[in-house]
Image: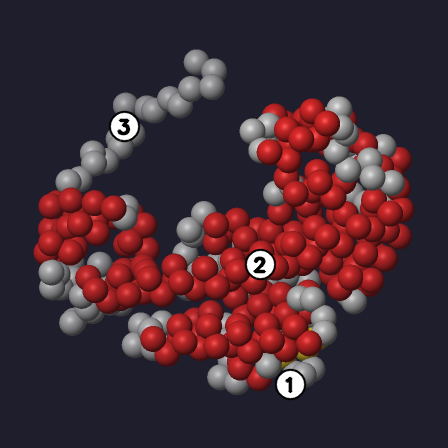
Amino acid sequence: MPNSVIFSERETIKSPASVTAQLGKLKSRGLIIEDEKYAYSTLETVNYYRLIHYFAFFLDDSGQYYREGISFNDGMRLYHFDRKLRAVILSVLEEIEVAIRAGVSNFHAHKYEAQGYLNGNTFERRHNHKAFLSKIERMLDKNAHLAFVKHYQNKHKGKFPLWVMMEMFSFGMLVFFYQDMKNNDKKEVAERYFKIDSRNAENWFENLANLRNHCAHYNRVYGNDLPGDLRKVEIIEPREYEMQSDGSPTLFDYLLIIKMLHRRGNEQEDWGKSFVSDIGKLFDEYSDIAHPTVLGFPEDWVNFFV
């Protein structure tokens, strides 16, 4: 049976447990349920399987039972810390994505004209232009309801300049576009707009897109392996710092990259102050539950962002 999932007779799938049964399982493992109504309503709106990944931080050495005194509220506090942390990360990633979108579209459109992206010769030879144009068509179909898409379809006979088309690009599509640009063009974009090496730009853009997807899909950040393998960079101020290079970058490593990519000038300092304030407040509010070292933050982490 093609395209079907086939299970052998020995394979079984667990039956769904009621919320009452889920609470009973947590209790049997030693978790304190202080407020039954709150716990019940929470499990009705947040998947049990999602929550136990947060509660797992409070298991004892056996991995079967919760440490003495650990409650449902402790697990939920860690859950809410992670949710708020993702919001801060997504906020700064949005600014980076918008900046990349502007830099790439401005450069390409000025060098190759407004619709130069429709010409495969404006990209590297490895670029699959037929596949790229197919993605463009699917993107237009998906966004056909948007007012600006209707405007260009009706008033401009479907001729979209790159800076308009790019507003429909996902972060991943944006990275794909940059990575397929001519090598000299990539180098100029990286140096002109971000003052970095193009090899770093390719790697960092891709990994930040993966981090964005990780956060946007509500995956846990705290104590979780983050996606990607960041290209290491030497940090010498405010002191020497060595980024992870074993395929498991920490959140702190990612944030250092974000700082380097963030727009330059006076606003860079303002961003640093705002970021430090937001993250610092989170760490203070949840100091009994979440610890910066789990996210790769050194004790003097504040000095790296101000």
In the shown orientation, is residue 199 left or right of residue 2? right
Q: Quadrant of the C terminus?
A: bottom right
Which secondary structure, mark 1?
loop
**The N terminus sits in image quarter:** top left
Q: Residues within 10 Å of mark 2 (few under 14, many from 20)?
A: many
**Image coords of residue 16 (percent x, y):** 20, 36
> Which residue sits at x=82%, y=35%?
115
Q: Would you call the spot at circle 3 few (<14 residues within 10 Å), some (14-19), or many (20 or more)?
A: few
Query: Helix, strand or loop at disc 3?
Result: loop
- Mark-to-mark CA distance, 3 and 1: 59 Å
Residue 63 in which image quadrant:
bottom left
Label 3 or label 1, whichever comes before in sequence order: 3
Depth-wise, is mark 3 or mark 1 nearer the camera?
1
Mark 3 or 2 closer to N-term? 3
Q: Badge 1 is on which residue?
A: 238
User: What type is the residue that disc 1 sits on?
Assistant: Pro
**Viewer-nearest residue: 293 or 114:** 114
Check disc 3 and report the residue beneath it: 10
Foreground: disc 2 or disc 1: 2
Taking the spot 60% from the left edge, 51% from the top edge, the residue there is: 209
As measured in the structure, the alpha-carbon distance from the residue carrying label 2 to the one carrying label 1 is 23 Å
Type of residue at label 2?
Leu
Above or below 129: residue 19: below
Query: Which label was assigned to residue 93?
Result: 2
